[in-house]
Amino acid sequence: MLEEIERFIAQDNPQRASAFIDRLLEKGDAIASFPNMGRVVPELSQPEIREILVGKYRIVYKETSDHIVILTVFEGHRSLRFKELDP
């Protein structure tokens, strides 16, 4: 998933692509430490499925009793496809 995002951005700007992936990874680390920092995904209204916005991208994740699962990362202008949420 992240490789696809990096390749897409790198078509226009390779340095920006690498920096953006680093930013996504940093947000993933922050989610692990503070799982409630994201908002509930509006399309789902399920409190355990949340998202963080990073630039034009959405990181959708699920909080379980003992860990965080990143369900998908996608461009925010696209619709959330529910099949992406199956871990």
Image (tube, rainbow, N blue to C red):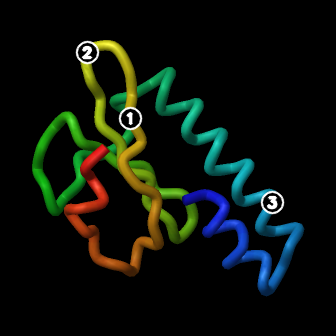
User: In the current view of this chain or complex, which residue is farthest to the top?
Assistant: 66
Estimate the x, y position of residue 53 in percent, counting from the top left. 46, 57
The CA distance from mark 2 to mark 1 is 11 Å
Q: How many marks?
A: 3
Residue in the picture at 20% in, 34% down: 48
Q: Is 12 located above or below residue 38 in the figure? A: below
Q: Quarter of the image holding residue 21? A: bottom right
Could you say which disc has been placed on residue 69 in the image?
A: 1
Q: What residue sits right under mark 2 in the picture?
A: 65
User: In the current view of this chain or complex, which residue is farthest to the right?
Assistant: 15
Label 3 crowd bin: few (<14), some (14–19), many (20+), radius 10 Å: some
Asked if the residue at tag 1 contacts the one at tag 2, i.e. Cβ–Cβ closer than 8 Å, the answer is: no
Q: Quadrant of the C terminus?
A: top left
Could you say which disc has been placed on residue 42 in the image?
A: none
User: In the current view of this chain or complex, which residue is farthest to the left?
Assistant: 45
**Callout 2 amino acid:** Ser
Residue in the picture at 11% in, 50% down: 45
Label 2 crowd bin: few (<14), some (14–19), many (20+), radius 10 Å: few
The disc, 2 or 3, on the residue closer to the chain's N-terminal end is 3
Helix, strand or loop at disc 3?
helix
Helix, strand or loop at disc 1?
strand
Q: What residue sits right under mark 3 in the picture?
A: 18
* Nearer the observer, 87 or 57: 87
